[in-house]
Image (cartoon, rainbow, N blue to C red):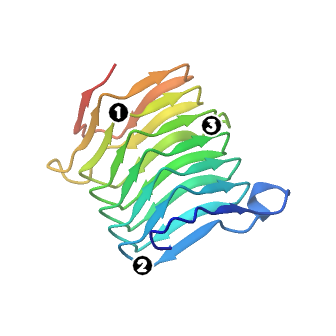
Amino acid sequence: MTRSKTHLRISSKSVVSSLRGEGIRLWYSRNNHIEGNEIIGVRDLLLINSPDNHIIGNRLQNNRISMEFIFSPGNEIRDNHIGNNDTGIVAIYSDELDIRNNRIEHIRNTGSSALAIKESSQVTIANNEIVHNAVGLTANSPVHPENILYLRGNHFTYNNIAIYFYGEKGGHVIHNE
């Protein structure tokens, strides 16, 4: 999708989340602007090998995975409202993501996280409202010590677990409320 004045409502059938169609899939795609849309009741918003996209000002609700980035570095995820999904934002092998000014709430499934960062480095998570989730943030240790996860100015509230780090190396910079 390219930037336009038309905002879309993307939805699927009212069935179990794993049986729904994907809302948006970007595969080997770059420099897209997904802005101001309602993505409701779909399986996933999925980006695979898709760098440098902009996901801004969307409402993602009642989906399986709000957004999943696999081998997709340099994406901007900003000003989105994410709620009542099975899982929030997942990043796997996706470096240099900029995740800021989002509201992520009511991700309550056991084992689910509002944010899950795995094997991704130089990720910035800043000024987000992370409210009433099973886990606010799950992150593993960076593969290399110079690869850091930056947490700044986020508000974690009413989560069962606010932040869950696993792995033995550390490598996180935290400045939160």
When asked about the image quadrant of residue 155, the answer is top left
Q: Quick one: label 1, few (<14), some, or many (20+) residues within 10 Å?
A: many
Q: Please state which amino acid type lies under the numbered disc 1.
A: Asn
70 or 152, nearer to the observer = 152
Q: Earlier in the sequence, mark 3 or mark 2?
A: 2
- Image location (x, y in percent) of residue 97: 32, 54
Q: Which of marks 2 and 1 is nearer the N terminus?
A: 2
Q: Please state which amino acid type lies under the numbered disc 2.
A: Ser
Q: Quick one: label 3, few (<14), some, or many (20+) residues within 10 Å?
A: many
- Image location (x, y in percent) of residue 61: 66, 47
Q: Please state which amino acid type lies under the numbered disc 3.
A: Ile
CA gap, disc 1 and disc 3: 18 Å
Q: Is residue 6 left or right of residue 125?
A: right
The C terminus lies in which quarter of the figure? top left
Q: Mark 2 points at which residue?
A: 29
Q: Quick one: label 2, few (<14), some, or many (20+) residues within 10 Å?
A: some
Q: In this view, does 173 lie to the left or right of 87?
A: left
Q: Which of marks 1 and 3 is nearer the N terminus?
A: 3
CA gap, disc 3 and disc 2: 28 Å
Q: Name the residue under label 3.
A: 107
Q: Name the residue under label 1.
A: 127
Q: In this view, does 130 lie above or below 1?
A: above
Which is in the foreground here, disc 3 or disc 2?
Answer: 2
- Image location (x, y in percent) of residue 13: 83, 62
When asked about the image quadrant of residue 109, the answer is top right
Point 76% across, 56% down: residue:
17
- Image location (x, y in percent) of residue 176: 31, 24
